[in-house]
Amino acid sequence: MSKEIKQIAIYGKGGIGKSTTSSNISAALAKLGYKVMQVGCDPKSDSTNTLRGGTYIPTVLDTLRAKGKVTADEIIFTGAGGVYCVEAGGPAPGVGCAGRGIITAVEQLKQLRVFENLDIDIVLYDVLGDVVCGGFAVPIREGIAKHVFTVTSSDFMAIYAANNLFAGIKKYSSTGGALLGGIIANSINAPYSRAIVDDFAARTQTQIVEYVPRSVTVTQAELQGKTVIEAAPDSAQAQVYLELAEKIAKHTDSKTPNPMSVEELHQWAGSWAEKLLKIETGEVAPKDGI
Amino acid sequence: MSNLDLTVPPRREDRHHETCLAYGGTVCGSRRPGKRCALMADAERGFTQGSICSLLPGLGIMCSLPDTAVLLHGGVGCGSSIHGINGNVRAGHNARRGKPFDALWFSTALNEVDVISGGDAKLERAIKEIDALYQPQVIVVVASCLPGIIGDDIDSVAAQVQPAVNARLLPVHCEGFKTRFMATAYDVIYHAIGRNLLPAPDEKIIREEKTINVMNVGSMGRIDEIEIERLFEELGLTANFYPVFARPESFSRATRAALSISTCPTHDDYFLTHLEEKFGVPYLIRNMPIGIANTSAWLRDLAEKLKLPQVEKLISAEEAELRAALQEFLPLFKDKRVFLSAGEYRSLATASLLKELGFKIAGIRSFHYDNFAEVELEKLRAGGEDFTWNVANVQPFEEANLLKKVKPDLFLGHWHGNQTAGRLGIPTHVIYNTGYGYIGYRGVYDLARRLHRKLSNTAFTDRLGKYGRLPYRDSWYQEEPFAYIRSKNAANAE
């Protein structure tokens, strides 16, 4: 019996910084000495760009389309720090079925037994946005990933997406699906941002794994086509990612979250809107408002 | 707004207020006091053994069209029923054109990669290739479930490719998963024809005063059309049979006809309304010319509309001749109990025919129910008797139980639908077979002659019943045949 591979799925609303966070976690894990594979599950196929000098790699589905079958060396590419990079790929915008694409790509990886053959310690699935259909739930069901982390900012739309994800996790939790490791709070600078995500975590009975501040270091690194770990290894931001990676590597017990109902979520968001308005108008001091 | 303005036609269950797939009771019991029908629109079976995909009747019609290629856009298995349909297509061409032609059909055979990337490009290639290699007048592009789920846009592909090909492209949306009512297929095909193959309504129409559109159905053979032509000739009329086995030119001829008449009301209303609204062709949709009284009523409707008083003379002469010819068969039929199973209207109309031959109706199974059936149900209710009536989209287990209890002397079932009765030792006959006559006065005689022969020697089914067996446990036969039928809402409320 081979060692247990730690499989982790990172979900979150589109544009929230999932791929940036995932790539930096992967790079940090590699730096900590783990053998890591990052699997991009998004038709945009840019999850691993910053691990590969800003370049795109051929996707599982492109290769499957072109050749009819795939081999491991056609779809696995080594990135910065030795992170193995895979992009599932998908259809062009507006056609076909991206969800089915993810199902097929993940099946291919399983059939090729790439995790075992490469002696991987940790696999990170970077999954597109909302759990809009069955395909996007693949990494969290059928026991593929064990732990889910969600990246969210304090924006309400990002929190809605996280809440949807929690509903998806809860649905599959009784049938061997993945459970929730916690929230990675991204772009947390304003004091109220932290209060909002803290409140959300409390309401849904989960935890904040790390607060990642918005930082110009990240932008600079991305413009060079690099992760922060590679481009600015001594920066404060790199330190945040390293701490996050350490926590994820040591994380063992995930839980079933308790998502809010649609009404609860609206009420909850409404109460926060009122508080923020009072802070904005100076009716209360920021410190007291939260 | 007409439904024809929509890309995709509405489903039967959305278009009709009263539709039902599961009912077990009686013909008279189906009428609620003071209301039309007691059938539950939301009736469900707790156990379902089978159902009918709308692609089946849809492909039956499309594959019959001469000079037409059918391109099935979907998984290759969706076309498997065409191998069965093809026998009917060959026989139909043989009867009409003197030579058997196979259905010309193709499949884009979508695979996993196509599902992910979308099948549009493959569809475009297939259309161009069929056009170049086979040069059909029409290419019907049929979307099965798969493109419906992944969102392939067959209408856009057809519109984009149309200038590059000679064939007229006819996009048809026949996604089986969308409807539980196979009759939706008829609407879907008429919808596509109405949108794509008829002349523009503003073109000047030169009316053909003696031409009548006779809407035929896949279960109607050429022999039945000949009977209608014979009767029409007596009235000085010409029939434009349409759409089954109809050439593309009879589509435009349909817009010039003096009148349209349906031979199966559940089949045609969608298109008849369109022909009347857009091209001023009035229509009749009430009776099915199966049975003596039904055929006479069908002709009377027609004659009344066209002001042809000579119809009465024709009817009395035909009826007299037929009744005299039937005499030799009637003693054997007297009080024999018969069970019927077929499409909604056909099963009910044939029950009226068999009553005229002296049979007792032991029970009827209709594949579905919609409001069109009421005319025919009323005729059966008016007779003062009541009959067991089962609405079932196939469900052989229910049929087996029912037949064991009802114990009929004769069973008339759908093409391929006589196995259950046969293995129970009940003499069977097909309720339609496109090689046999059923329609008009001639049809009554032909059917009576065949039933007489069948009942004169039942040795075959006697032995089948003795040695054949059905796969159900004895305990199932102890239960009520309709034990699994219940209201979905009631079930949810439990």
Image: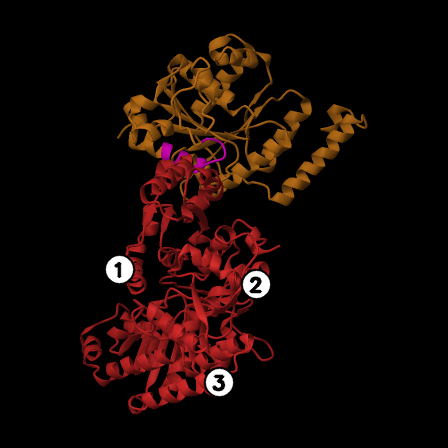
Chain that bears disc 1: B
Mark 2 vs mark 1: same chain? yes
Expressed as whole percent of the image width and height from the top left, the position of residue B308 reads 52, 79
Look at the image and give the colour of chain A.
orange
Density class for disc 2 (Cα within 10 Å; few <14, some 14-19, many ≥20) is: some
In the depicted structure, whether residue B348 falls above or below residue B205: below
Distance CA(mark 3)–CA(mark 2) = 27 Å
Density class for disc 1 (Cα within 10 Å; few <14, some 14-19, many ≥20) is: few
Give the residue at mark 3.
B312
**Mark positioned earlier in the residue sequence (3 or 2):** 2
Q: Name the secondary structure under disc 2.
A: helix
* Of the pair B82 and B360, the residue shown nearer to us: B82
| Foreground label between 3 and 2 | 3
Mark number for residue B276?
A: 2
Left or right, A19 with respect to A277, comes to left
The stretch drawn in magenta includes residue B133: no
Q: Residue at x 33, y 77 (%)?
A: B403
Q: Amino acid at mark 1?
A: Lys
In the depicted structure, whether residue B234 falls above or below residue A199: below
Disc tally is 3
Chain in red colour: B
Where does the magenta region start and end? A92-105
Expressed as whole percent of the image width and height from the top left, the position of residue A122 reads 38, 24
* Of the pair A97 and B428, the residue shown nearer to us: B428
Q: Name the secondary structure under disc 3.
A: helix
Chain that bears disc 2: B
Q: Amino acid at mark 2?
A: Glu
In the depicted structure, whether residue A181 falls above or below residue B230: above
Mark 3 vs mark 1: same chain? yes
